[in-house]
Image (cartoon, rainbow, N blue to C red):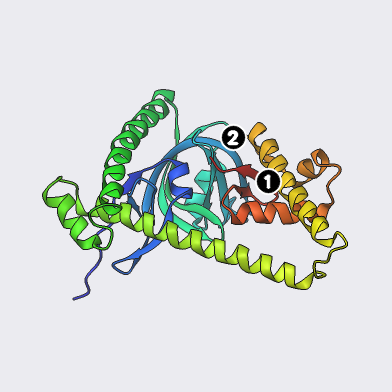
Amino acid sequence: MKSFRPRLLAVKSSIQDLVNGVAVQKDGMEFTVTPLGEWVSRAHVIGIAVDSFSSNANADGGGSYATLTIDDSSGILLRLKSWDAGVSARIRGIKVGCIVDVIGRVRRFQSETYIVPEIVREVKDVRIEKLRKLELLDKRKALEAVGAKILELLNDEFADDPEGLIAHASEKLGIPNDLVEGVLAFEYESRRLKELKANAIESETVKHTASGAPEDDGGGGSQKKDAVLLFEELKKKILQLLESNSHTGLEYSQLCSMLENAPGEEVDKALEALSDEGEIFEPRGGIFKRLV
């Protein structure tokens, strides 16, 4: 007889925690482990619809693909992507500005985190959105305190013994195994990704230096240092502009206009570098926001 996995509960989450989470395989399934140590396969999110898109409707008024971008005031936007005709029809019925309650599977493709919705419904009572924000705030405070304790033990008594840390936290502190494992999984995967980024940046720097003219006593070294300083100033200016437009973000054309003295090629390189460093992201193609 064929066995089936029990359906995982949808975890009430903020968009920020989902996007800032890491992808981890467990028991043959892919999860998003949030910075709070929660294992999320299916998420329950409430936000305000800020943008939508759907493919051309067919003869009966339906269509297989639709997206809805939502904002829960956590600083990052999230897209819902539906290929199901029924769900897509419900998405098309939601107007920008409406409060939306969503349950769905968390997915990642390239640098984007999105949700494949199973349930999409409009929320009429604004108190429900406010209540969810309070719920998430209380949960964040509690889990951050637990996470700090776990990391303190990891960096002290159990630096080379994660299994011992899990047992200790469970038996002595009463912390559930899944939460301890989640905090550790996020910490280890974050370290691995940071190391990969650092190695990639170092490799690119070495490659760039090797392809350039050798430094000489005629001022070549000084010119290179000046170029690096100008590039860092450009990155800093981009971050300042995105910080000043933190809610809506900025389109690529707007950034180029505001950085009128910067060559387009340098702007492209700066945006790519900031994205690799985890400072900015693209909620939609060609629109940039700063990660908070």
Please tell me whether mark 2 sits on a helix, a strand or a loop: loop
Q: Residue at x 14, y 45 (%)?
A: 174
State the residue lying farthest toward the front: 217
Residue 56 visible here = no
Instruction: Give the residue at mark 2.
Output: 96
In the visual, does 247 lie left or right of 211?
A: left
- Above or below, 286 against 185 in this view is above
Q: Residue furthest bottom?
A: 1
Q: Does any portion of residue 184 appear in the rendered image?
A: yes
Dot in front, 1 or 2: 1
- Mark 1 or mark 2: whose residue is earlier in sequence: 2
Residue 123 in the image: state x and y as whole percent.
44, 31
**Mark 1 neighbour density, 10 Å: few (under 14) some (14–19) many (20 or more):** some
Where residue 31 sits, quadrant-wise, is: bottom left
Residue 253 left/right relative to 168: right
Residue 34 vs residue 63, the one in the foreground = 34
Circle 2 crowding by C-alpha within 10 Å: few under 14, some 14–19, many from 20: some
Q: Position of residue 229 (x, y in %)?
A: 74, 49
Q: Can you say whether 198 is above or below 211 in the image?
A: above
What residue is shown with label 1?
287
Task: Using the rendered view, name the quadrant where residue 205 is placed.
Answer: bottom right
- Apparent side of residue 265 relative to residue 41 in the rendered image (left or right): right
For the point 29% across and 38% down, the residue is: 145
- In the rendering, at what x and y percent does residue 127 appear? 40, 23
In this rendering, the answer to whether 135 lies above or below 218 is: above
